[in-house]
Image: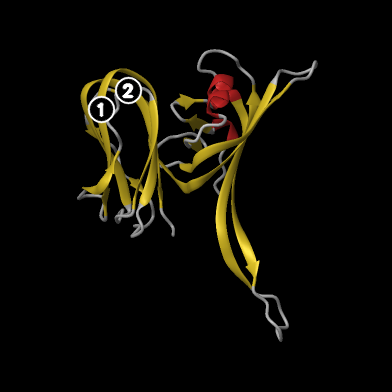
Amino acid sequence: MPTFIAGKDNKILFGAYDLTSYFNSANFSREQAVNETTTFGSSQATYIGGIESASASLTGFWDGGSDAVDEELQAIIGSASATPLSIYQGGDTAGNKVVLLNSKIQNYTIDSSVADAVGISATFTGDNFGNGKSLYALTNTSATANTTAVDMGASSSLGGQAFLHCTAHSTANISVKIQSSADNSSFADVSGFAFTDLSGITSERIATTNTVNRYVRLAITVTSGSATFSVGYAHNLK
């Protein structure tokens, strides 16, 4: 039987901010160009796959407060840097599906009508995208721990990418790295696959081409303070 989830539980993390409460619709799309290669003498058209791309769109309601949605989206228009965008399906509980887009904003619209609340919409594209799972829900963290591993279904000899969103901190000095295991028992660091130590609110995308085994977890080391952060991960497919 199919397993369905409620869209009301989706979570939107953008950069160092949890913008979930401002949006009521989220869309993510992957596209692939298809190039025709039909030659003389053919009775049917033939095609080859071309360049892949991805886009996301969000719609919701305007809020002009400090660190609210308008301030954060206006701030990145024209930026040369990409911003990690994570759209969690059914919430960010570890193991839930997430789409990752290292995003560049294409359009931000404020829509006002006398009969309705002021609305907003935004569209994004990006050159790094993934279809993965949550490794760690947005949680205030103050203790060293290894998280429960998430089963990715198979290993990836092509590596993977991970997004971290840190939305709050208190004198934090915390390291977060990714480990993997073939048997969900013996774990090892994935070489070079560690985030910059957390000392304030931030977001970061990291990537590796080293093999990531089937079971993936975080190794969190808290030297001092606390931080509220989440991590999503996706295997590289190509």
**Residue 51 lies in what quarter of the image?**
bottom right
Q: How many marks?
A: 2
Counting from the top left corner in percent of width and height, residue 191 is at 24, 49
State whether residue 12 appears in this view. yes
Side of 140 relative to 190 (left or right): right
Q: Marks 1/2: CA distance?
A: 8 Å
Residue 163: x, y in percent?
Answer: 40, 38
Whether the residues at callouts 1 and 2 have beta carbons within 8 Å, the answer is yes
Residue 138 appears anywhere in the view? no
* Kind of residue at badge 1: Ile
Give the residue at x 27% y 49%: 180
| Above or below: residue 133 compared with residue 36 | above
* For residue 127, above or below residue 82: below
Q: Is residue 183 left or right of residue 22?
A: left
Dot 1 alpha-carbon crowd within 10 angstroms: few under 14, some 14 to 19, many 20 or more: many
Label 2, secondary structure: give it.
strand
In the image, what residue type sits under mark 2? Ala
Circle 2 residues within 10 Å: few <14, some 14–19, many ≥20: many
Q: Position of residue 230 (x, y in %)?
A: 38, 32
| Image point (59%, 23%), residue name | 22
Give 22 or 1, whichever is nearer the viewer: 22
Per the image, the residue denoted by label 1 is: 174
Mark 1 vs mark 2: which is more N-terminal? 1
Give whichever of 96, 202 is nearer the camera: 202
Q: Which mark is residue 227?
A: 2
- Identify the residue shown where x is 52% and y is 13%: 66
Mark 1: which secondary structure?
A: strand
Residue closest to the eye, 222 or 173? 173
Q: Horizontal and vertical percent for residue 100? A: 48, 42
